[in-house]
Image: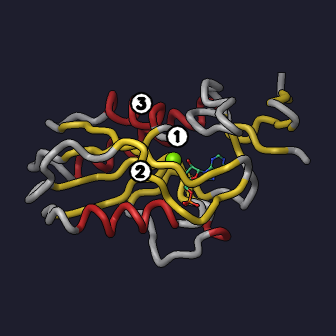
Amino acid sequence: MNKINILDKEFAVSIPFEHIQSTVKRMAVKLSGDYQNKKPLFLCVLNGAFMFAADLLKSYTGQCEISFIKLASYAGTKTTGSVRTLIGLEEDIKGRDVIILEDIVDSGITISHLIEDLKSYEPASIKIAALLLKPAAVQKDVRPDYVGLEIPNDFIVGYGLDYNGFGRNLKDIYKITE
Ligand code: IMP
Ligand code: MG
């Protein structure tokens, strides 16, 4: 089925599973090359990036660590403009090469907030790998260093992304039909 209902909204497939998988694989290959002689710390931003992080790291070939932080900025289909830290950082990242794994960069508010926060712990480097980027929505001066796909400014769900908590388990990415 191409169309599904989640709560009060209708969605249609926008990025099929196979396309997501080849995109994530390509990003993993690039990162594996770029970090060949390093031991990066991947920082997965929960909840949305959990599937992306799992698939990406299965194809990452070098030595690395993975940690998780939990941030929230969305309510329904819109950003609230403020970022709340629900679970913070446990690791000492001083001197480490950190790669932030994000499902999507939309307004950029979440990622710019996170980067400012991480900088105070003096990592050797911070890069952003985002599966998706909505270029039309970006308000902050942040560009992910690694982008899977650029997408239009539509609300989407699936592959980790949710609508009020639902839809994260879908293996394809769906966009709202209105
Ligand atoms: P930003 O702070 O506006 O860049 O939004 C980043 C976070 O909001 C992402 O990490 C997602 O978790 C969530 N988000 C942004 N756009 C969407 C969307 O279209 N669907 C579901 N969640 C989204
Ligand atoms: Mg997210």
Instruction: Say if 56 sits above or below 113 in the image.
Output: above
Foreground pick, 49 / 174 = 49
The answer for how far apart the CA atoms under marks 3 and 2 are is 24 Å
Percent across and percent down for residue 153 are 72, 61
Q: Which residue type does callout 2 highlight? A: Thr
Q: Which residue type does callout 3 highlight? A: Asp
> Is residue 32 toward the left or the right of residue 80 in the image?
left
Pointers 2 and 1 in contact (C-beta within 8 Å): no
Q: Earlier in the sequence, mark 3 or mark 2?
A: 3
Mark 1 residue's CB less than 8 Å from ligand 2: yes
Instruction: Say if 159 sits above or below 93 in the image.
Output: above
Q: Residue under circle 1?
A: 48
Pointers 3 and 2 in contact (C-beta within 8 Å): no
Q: Residue under circle 3?
A: 55
Instruction: Say if 16 sits above or below 129 in the image.
Output: above
The answer for how far apart the CA atoms under marks 2 and 1 are is 14 Å
Q: Earlier in the sequence, mark 2 or mark 1?
A: 1
Mark 2 residue's CB less than 8 Å from ligand 2: no
Q: Earlier in the sequence, mark 1 or mark 3?
A: 1
Q: Residue under circle 2?
A: 85
Question: To which quarter of the image does residue 46 belong?
Answer: top left
Foreground pick, 144 / 43 = 43
Percent across and percent down for residue 73 are 56, 54
Instruction: Say if 19 sits above or below 124 in the image.
Output: above
